[in-house]
Amino acid sequence: MKREEFDNLKVGDLCVVKGKYDNGRIVMVRYIEDEMIVIKAVDGECLHDPVGIKNKKLRMTGWHWLDVIPTKVES
């Protein structure tokens, strides 16, 4: 995700996880504060937390570990 995308990110937006843990999983943004984002998998399954807590429904991550899924705009 680019900085501009992060600045426009809202609760409820869909993203794809990048990196080692949960790579490729689709998640929904649940909370944003400062540079951190709380995410939840849309499939309802648990996420892996890279700091050691496994099998949690919510995970805190940085904006650089996500890519925004573009929404379709109808004209």
Image (spheres, rainbow, N blue to C red):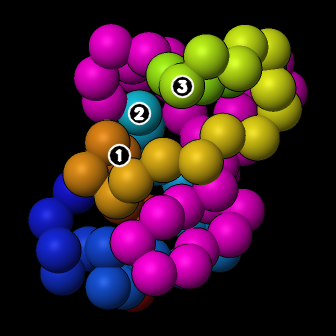
Where is 73 relative to 65, above or below? below
- Name the residue carrying label 1: 66
Q: Secondary structure at mark 2?
A: strand
What amino acid type is highlighted by mark number 2?
Answer: Val
- Looking at the rendered structure, the number of numbered marks drawn on it comes to 3
The location of residue 42, given as percent across then percent down, is: 73, 36
Q: Disc 1 to disc 2, how far (Cα)?
A: 5 Å
- Viewer-closest of 40 and 73: 40
Quadrant for the N terminus in the image: bottom left
**Farthest residue in the front direction?**
52
Mark 3 is on which residue type?
Answer: Val
Which quadrant holds residue 20?
A: top left
Mark 3 or 2, nearer chain start: 2
Q: Amino acid at mark 1?
A: Leu
Q: Regarding mark 3 in the picture, which secondary structure is present there?
A: loop
Question: Would residue 57 appear left or right of 75 to someone viewing this image?
Answer: right
One can see residue 68 in this view = no
Residue at 41% across, 33% down: 17
In which quadrant is the C terminus drawn? Answer: bottom left
Q: Which residues are magenta?
A: 18-46
Question: Are the residues flagged by discs 1 and 2 in contact, CB closer than 8 Å?
Answer: yes
Q: Estimate the x, y position of residue 60 in percent, counting from the top left.
A: 59, 48
Q: Position of residue 31 (x, y in %)?
A: 68, 69
Image mark for residue 51: 3
Numbered tag placed on residue 17 in the rendering: 2
Pinpoint residue 48: horizontal percent, then vertical percent: 62, 17
Residue at disc 1, secondary structure: strand
Q: Mark 2, residues whose alpha carbon is within 10 Å: few (<14), some, or many (≥20)?
A: many
Q: Which is in the foreground here, disc 3 or disc 1? A: 3
